[in-house]
Image (spheres, rainbow, N blue to C red):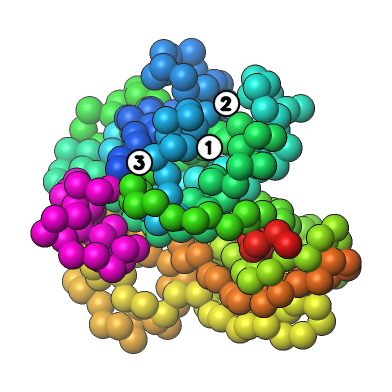
Amino acid sequence: MKKLFAILLCLQALGCKTSKQESYSTERQIFDHVIFYNGYGKTVDEPVPENVIRLKNSSYVKKLTQDDLNAISDRLNLQVTLHARCDNYDRLGHVGLNFVKKGKPYTDKNVVVRQEIARFVSPFMNKNKMPNSVDYLYEINNIGRLLNNKELRNTYDFWIQFDLFGTPDAAQKEVSGCEGRGDIYGGSMKLVSSSAKYSNKDEKLVHLYSRDKLDNYKHSDVEGETIKVNDFTLEKPVNNARLYVITSNHGANKGGEEYIRREHMVYFDGEELAKYTPGGESCEEFRVVNTQGNGIYGKRPKKLEDWARWNNWCPGNKIPIRIYELGDLIAGKHQFKIDVPEAEFKDQKGYIPLTVYIQGEEK
């Protein structure tokens, strides 16, 4: 896997020849088999790896060291690995980048910005069957440029957050060896980068949303509609700005939002920027990691058109990070808006976790 991932990095990020330059990639192990526990349970007091802080059963943080940061270039990949334990259902996981006041301990009052940067869905996985782990690979070159901003480094410490909420209730009954257990998954995370020298442009992040709930019955800026509007002000111009959007539809009740594909409308400064409808792709390639019998996959393969009729995402896959070019933004007032006009949220259940941020060169 290490060699394969080095080759992937080389091809995708560097455009280099693999014969001599595989060794020019660097790996930093941020989390190594941290154990997630029942998200509904009391926070456990089990030991954690060195320098890792357990915020709760479903959440850990760890500060990036100077060595970590020095190993990161503007060609950066993220690898998340889940190791099956005692949760055999599909769950939502997240990776976040937290900006913490320089030299201060990790506390709520010292966290200046919390920003989700990646999202994934665990598979239906039985720990007693193979494969018993699943990898999620992301290209996050923009985060590499951010972490190399000297001004940001001098102002903040960067803490990586690793979240996975789940419960062992079903596995305790359905999976051999899980009776009475509260551990749901093990989690590992690596940052894989190029050691090539480069000239970093000072990029800044403009935080808009991070895992904020969106629906039409409680979390909306327009009553009865699925709309979020964020009016914000840039103190300085931002050149080559890009908008990053992460959304996923949830609601597993009959007629819920997980099972109906909805068009999403994105607006910026009053103009329509993009339309997209999540899903529509085959989930068959992830069947191999869904080792627990479940109602999503069934016993027989499905055709593409069968998946495309209803699926918003695949258990065992990452959620897309959608990127939109904004060009050069002037200082002053701006507005972001997202609208999912046909969403129903039947029985007032379900939600869309909304993550949005802007990144670009600070002029």
Nearer the observer, 55 or 8:
8
Q: Amino acid at mark 3?
A: Lys
Residue 161 image label: 1
Counting other residues with Cα less than 10 Å from the Cα at mark 1, is it few (<14), some (14-19), or many (20 or more)? many
Per the image, label 1 sits on a secondary structure element best described as strand
Instruction: Please identify, in this view, whether the residue under mark 1 or under mark 3 is nearer the observer.
Output: 3
Does 22 lie within the magenta span? yes
Instruction: Please identify, in this view, whether the residue under mark 1 or under mark 2 is nearer the observer.
Output: 1
Q: Amino acid at mark 2?
A: Leu
Q: Amino acid at mark 1?
A: Gln
- Against 67, is 18 above or below? below
Per the image, label 3 sits on a secondary structure element best described as strand
Q: In the picture provided, is 239 more to the left or to the right than 199?
A: right
Taken as a whole, is the magenta stretch helix, strand or loop? helix
Q: Residue at x 33, y 30 (%)?
A: 32
| Number of numbered labels in the structure image | 3
Percent position of residue 197, x then y = 39, 51
Nearer the observer, 66 or 89:
66
Q: Residue at x 61, y 76 (%)?
A: 325
**Residue 217 shows up from this direction:** no
Per the image, label 2 sits on a secondary structure element best described as strand
**Of label 1 and label 3, which has the lower sequence position?**
1
Q: Mark 1–mark 2 contact, CB under 8 Å?
A: yes
Q: Which residues are magenta?
A: 1-25
Q: Which residue is mark 2?
A: 55
**Of label 1 and label 2, which has the lower sequence position?**
2
User: Residue 188 is drawn in which quadrant?
Assistant: top left
Q: Residue at x 63, y 56 (%)?
A: 203
Instruction: Please identify, in this view, whether the residue under mark 2 or under mark 3 is nearer the observer.
Output: 3
Q: Which residue is mark 3?
A: 190
